[in-house]
Image (tube, helix red, strand yellow):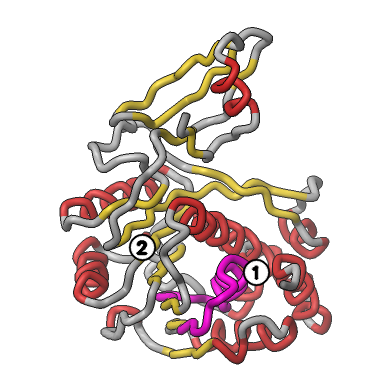
Amino acid sequence: MKDIEKELFLSINNLFEHISIKNLKSSTKQLTKKYRNQKAAKFFVSEEERLSYIACRMMATFKAIQYALNEIKSICPKIKVQSALDLGAGPATSVFAFFSTFKNLKKLHLVEKDEKMLFYGKGLLTFSNIGLSNTTFEKNDILKIKNYEFDAVILSYVANELKNFQIEKIINRWAKSKSKIIIFIEPGTMYGFKNIRWIRQKLIDDGFDIIAPCPNKLRCPMAKNDWCHFYVRVKRSKIHKYLKDAKLGYEDEKFSYVIATKEKVKTPKSRILRFITKSKREITLPLCKDGKFIYEKISIKDKNKYKTAKKLNWGDSFDV
């Protein structure tokens, strides 16, 4: 398999070879504000904003989706994902993530109401030659889509723009279909997590199992002034650094997510929700476990647990 992450990185750079980026700085700042505010009725209002998104947000979105998909493979390896529906697909970001994760993927259907984003997505896939022959595109409002007959349905960075009743409509349509998995990903902010938390409870109330990140279906233990989120490290291109006036060659994308299934799932016992702390004598793990947010100390004397815990990081499951 190709190094798909590298191919996406090169495809984005190729797109900007014949585009002036001097006028994109202000639109990049505006886009950042929109993500912080979280509430945008019409997300892209100009060509500059679309290009700023591709330059500064696409790699981060890819990494977040890839992270979530890898959780499916890790926790539910027997569930086959050979087809997927992306509602609110943007510039085809999920194509790169799905094909980097599921080798036997045969069909991916993208729904996006922004015609220009679909145009850029097709261009990026054409340059990289990844998934183009297996991908179909539909310009439409995601709420008008009724065919959910795909193994997986994904909404990434979309639910924050929807009302609860609209999300309910999507979940109900998925529930009535033969689809096995539904995935929601949102920015790792208080507002993003608030929506993910509501979606999680809705899915549990409707009788579905949670694949990740939750290790159980008990009441979410996060306090009102706290939020459950994870992160991926994203390499910045020269264009990205220029547009954001950034010095570091990377950034950390924080996100919240939930994955549900109609299958029965054996989840890990706990999930690490923050950076772990280490000393010479013990490791402390901030865990979501048994419906509580706890700090579990593992002594060096407990050799098996200690050896396992040493290799873990924020976001990993802990099943010892």
Q: Which residue is mark 1?
A: 52
269 left or right of 101? left
Reply above or below: 61 against 105. above
Q: Residue at x 52, y 43 (%)?
A: 230
* Residue 222 to residue 83: above or below: above
Magenta span has 56?
no
Residue at image point 18% right, 55% down = 207
On whether residue 103 falls in the magenta region, the answer is: yes
Q: Which residue is mark 2?
A: 159
> x, y (%) of residue 8?
71, 71
Residue 288: name its quadrant: top left
Pointer 1 or 2: first along the chain: 1
* Quarter of the rendering containing residue 91: bottom right
Q: Who is closer to the viewer here, 224 or 47?
A: 224
Frontmost of labels 1 and 2 is: 2
Quadrant of the rendered image containing residue 168: bottom left
Label 1: few (<14), some (14–19) or many (≥20) C-alpha neighbours in 10 Å: many
Residue occupying the point 80% across, 50% down: 249
In the picture, the quarter occupied by the N terminus is bottom right
Spot occupied by residue 161 in the image (x, y as percentages of width and height): 36, 65
Provide the residue span drawn in magenta: 86-109
Disc 1 on helix, strand or loop? helix
Residue drawn at (33%, 57%) of the image: 260
Q: Is residue 7 left or right of residue 136?
A: right
**Label 2 crowd (10 A; few <14 / some 14-19 / many >=20):** many
